């Protein structure tokens, strides 16, 4: 067994695995979706300082609204593999795996999908990852017009703290978890300071910030409504 950590997610390979993936036509893929939960990696692409996140407004199911930049995993993929593939395909950017970090994991159940019968829906296990773009990279971003009607760079905090009805709760939760990751990084840095009353006060303030953010995790029924009228 070989084990490795990819973008903060343990990845284990048992035996000499060789992928045998192949393209499935919509009919076959739809039949497969009725019986499996697919794995997806969705990216919170942020500005160089991490304060703003790139959101795309999708025009296809299962989420025809503001969403991550992302896509499904393939057999044998580490979490970093589809992330790099997605960044190249969706944004035209070459981003190495060392620049990609894990944020959180979510499960998603959708009432609608693209493949017939559309109302059979689809289910996902979602790994949310993040990467920061330089100003030059951000200026070269161009999303696929067939999947996205528009895109915006928005403050991470604004998305995390937006009204429930504005963004899908999975998107708001991911942005909140990204803020937790940022606070954790600052906590690790502060822990390296020489012991003092000031250092202890800094550690306590960051710890309180993290606890407050984590207390806002979604629960119960959301006020968010899809364009199709489906509700979470």
Image (cartoon, rainbow, N blue to C red):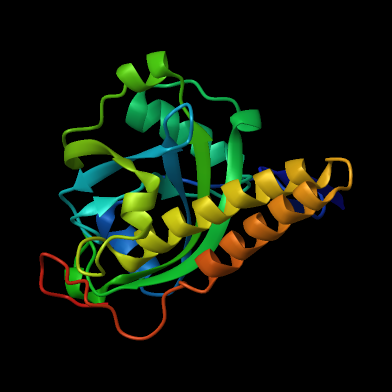
Q: Nearer the viewer, residue 171 or 1?
A: 171
Rendered residue at 15%/49% (across/down): 59
Question: Residue 222: x, y in percent?
Answer: 28, 78
Above/below status of 99 relative to 31: above
**Figure disc tally:** 0
Residue 120, image x, y percentages? 25, 75
> Which quarter of the figure is the C terminus placed in?
bottom left
Which residue is depicted at the point 62% across and 64% down?
208
Quarter of image, res 225: bottom left
- Residue 218: which quarter of the image? bottom left
Question: Among all residues in the image, which is located at the extreme front?
Answer: 197
Image location of residue 175, percent across then percent down:
43, 54
Name the residue at the top extreme. Answer: 136
Q: Residue furthest left?
A: 228
Of the pair 145 and 67, the residue shown nearer to us = 67
Placement of 210 over or under 78, stated as above or below: below
Q: Position of residue 142 (x, y in %)?
A: 26, 25
Quick check: can you spot residue 117?
no
Q: Nearer the viewer, residue 82 or 223?
A: 223
Q: What residue is shown at x 87% (from left), y 53% (from top)?
A: 1
Visible in this render: residue 44? yes
Residue 116 sits above or below residue 102 on the image: below
């Amino acid at each position: 067994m070989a084990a490795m950590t990819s973008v903060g997610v343990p990845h284990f390979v048992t035996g000499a695995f060789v992928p045998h993936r192949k393209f499935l036509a919509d009919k076959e893929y739809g039949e497969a979706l009725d019986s499996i939960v697919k794995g997806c990696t969705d990216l919170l692409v942020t500005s160089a300082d991490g304060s703003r996140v790139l959101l795309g407004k999708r025009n296809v199911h299962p989420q025809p609204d503001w969403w991550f930049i992302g896509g499904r995993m393939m057999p044998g993929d580490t979490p970093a593999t589809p992330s790099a593939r997605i960044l190249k395909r969706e944004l035209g950017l070459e981003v190495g795996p060392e620049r990609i970090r894990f944020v959180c994991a979510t499960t998603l159940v959708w009432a609608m999908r693209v493949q017939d019968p559309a109302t059979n829906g689809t289910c996902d296990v979602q790994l949310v990852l993040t990467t920061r773009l330089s100003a030059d990279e951000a200026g070269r971003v161009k999303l696929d017009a067939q999947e996205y009607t528009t895109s915006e760079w928005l403050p991470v905090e604004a998305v995390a703290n937006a009204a429930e009805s504005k963004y899908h709760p999975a998107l708001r939760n991911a942005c909140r978890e990204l803020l937790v990751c940022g606070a954790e990084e600052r906590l690790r840095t502060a822990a390296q300071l020489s012991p003092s009353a000031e250092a202890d006060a800094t550690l306590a303030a960051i710890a309180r910030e993290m606890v407050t953010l984590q207390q806002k995790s979604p629960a119960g029924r959301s006020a968010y409504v899809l364009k199709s009228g489906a509700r979470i």
